[in-house]
Structures are given as structure tokens and as C-alpha cells.
Image (cartoon, rainbow, N blue to C red):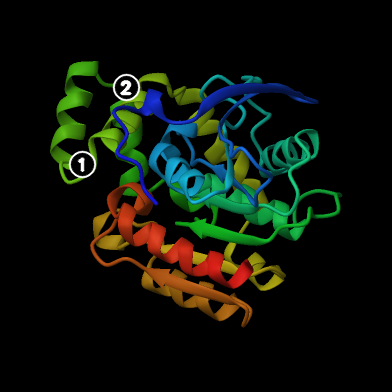
Amino acid sequence: MTQDLGSVADSGTSHYVDLPAGRFHYRRWAPEVPAPSAVLVHGNGGTWATWARVGAALGAAGMDVLAVDLRGSGASVRPPAGSYGLREVAGDLDDFLRALRVHAPLLIGHCWGGAAALALATGAVADRVPPVLSGLVLEELPPDMAATATQPVVRDFLRMMRSSPEYVAKWVDLVCRDWHPVDRESLLEELRGADVQVYLSAIDEGAAAGPLLPLLARVKVPALVLRGDPRRGGMLSDADWQLARECLPGHCVAGELPGSGHELHRGDFAGFMRLVRELLATVA
């Protein structure tokens, strides 16, 4: 199911689509015949590249996979500060699905991307009818965006964005030494291109949505909610995790990967894909 990629550039093909907010870039792993879809949504400061191996693996399994660059990220449109609330980002996702006529996808979101995916799936922050989804994967969903500002992983990311390329490369090699080379490369690519102002705007403006974990009770499709180890950079405390599990409806499951931090899909790719495959087996 996985592919041994030579580099991030070897994964998928680049495309653009014009949406109401502007032009958006996305990466696609498209099968030769119609297939179930998966839409991958990166976290704050990330790009499609965070999903290079996940996209390739799901594509190799026969899915039509699309990984979008959110507004202000990668090669997508970069609106000014004041345009990075959850309403705007979830609205972009809705527009993306409609423009490309993506039917009933599995929606996978990491951190800020998970918040946007949850908001879209529940219709919580916009006057829109939620799209039809086959399932939902929420990796390291923040308890609320305001709380992320004090997280060590956020402080580290901000420091790396403001550091020299040489220092960043050494930091990634040291801290992420157990990652696959493609995953280390993708993180370096994201750090090189991330915009500090956009990163901070997503935190500040996203905070207006308030607590996110109670929204889990409104999820109507099979969902997998994943937490990383808070001792290794995971954002959800034990109290947050207990609340998340209490809010989850019976058709949803919660999972943890021991030893993984905030980046489960890169830090424990095999474990992440195993849990995603288990969810896929229930929605097929």
C-alpha cells in the first residue's frame, strides 16, 4: 500500500482550481478508473507536502486523493490578515469539494486542518449545508485555537520559521531523525515557505470559533479522532482527551499511537495508515 518515494516532488501531480477566494493549489493521486475519494487537509504552517507519503499510499490502494494547500499556504492564494478565521477556511474547503465535484470523500485533517474539516462536517461556523462525507479523520484536533499559542510545538515551529536554513536543517535532522527521509524533506519544505503572519493569523482569528471538542458530538459520519503523546508535543492533555472521548458519538472511535507527538502521520506513518485502513473498512 505504501510507495518508496525518492522525494516529495515524486508524489502526486500539481493542479490549480479557481474558487471564490482566489486560486488554490492541490496535489492529486488519481486512479485510472473512478474510485472513492480522500481529501487531505494540512495543519497550520503546512502544505500539501505533509501528506506526500499518505497520499501516495492511499492512491496506491486505489483511491482518488486530493491534498489542498489552504489559503495562505503553499502555492494557494494569500489573502491579507483578517481573512483566516475558521469560517473562511471551512468555506474554502466546501468550495473546493463543490468545484471539483468530489462526492462523499473521506476527509482527513491535521490540527488546524482538522479544525476546518470538523467545522465543515458539522456546519458549525458557516450558514451552509454540510457536504456529504463518507468519513472523517481528525489528527491532533486542537481543543481550541487560542490554546495552541502556548503549545511547545507551536513555539518550536515559530522559532524554526525565524531561523536560518542551516539551523533549521540541523534541527529537523536531530528532532525528526526517526522519520522517513521524505517526511523530513516535506517538513523542511514547509518551514522554508511558511509565512509567520499567516501562521499567527490562523491562531488569533481561529480562536474566535471557541472550543472545538464539543463539536465532536455533532459528527454524523464514521470518524477516527487521533491524539499524539502530550509528552512528545501532542496538543491534547489528558483532560482534553477525556472530554473528546466523552463527546464522540458511538459510531466514532478514538485512537492513540504511543510514542508519537503532534505529527502522527509522519512520526508513526505505519501506525497512522493502519488506523486509517481500519476506518476505511467500516465505510467501504
Task: Give the left or right position of residue 196, taking residue 251 as reference.
Answer: left
Task: Give the left or right position of residue 193, taking residue 91 as reference.
Answer: left
Q: How many labels were placed on the picture?
A: 2
Task: Give the left or right position of residue 108, taking residue 4 as reference.
Answer: right
Front position in the image: 17 or 139: 17
Marks 1 and 2 in Cβ contact (< 8 Å): no
Please provide percent x and percent y for residue 33. 65, 42
Front position in the image: 216 or 154: 216
| Above or below 54: residue 23 | above
Please provide percent x and percent y for residue 195. 47, 22
Front position in the image: 216 or 211: 216
Front position in the image: 61 or 69: 61
Residue 255 is tagged as none
Residue count near mark 2 (Cα–Cα under 10 Å), binned few <14, some 14–19, many ≥20: some
Q: Is residue 132 visible?
A: yes
Dot 2 corresponds to which residue?
Answer: 162
Q: Is residue 262 visible?
A: no
The amino acid marked with disc number 1 is Cys
Residue at image point 50% right, 40% down: 42
Q: Secondary structure at mark 2?
A: loop
Please provide percent x and percent y for residue 141. 50, 57
Based on the displayed image, in which of its 4 quarters is residue 41 positioned? top right
Which is in the foreground here, disc 1 or disc 2?
Answer: 1
Residue at image point 55% right, 23% down: 14
| Above or below 113: residue 252 | below
Based on the displayed image, in which of its 4 quarters is residue 81 positioned? top right
Q: Secondary structure at mark 1?
A: loop
Mark 1 → mark 2, Cα distance in angstroms = 19 Å
The amino acid marked with disc number 2 is Arg
Dot 1 corresponds to which residue?
Answer: 176
Which comes before the other along the chain, label 1 or label 2?
2
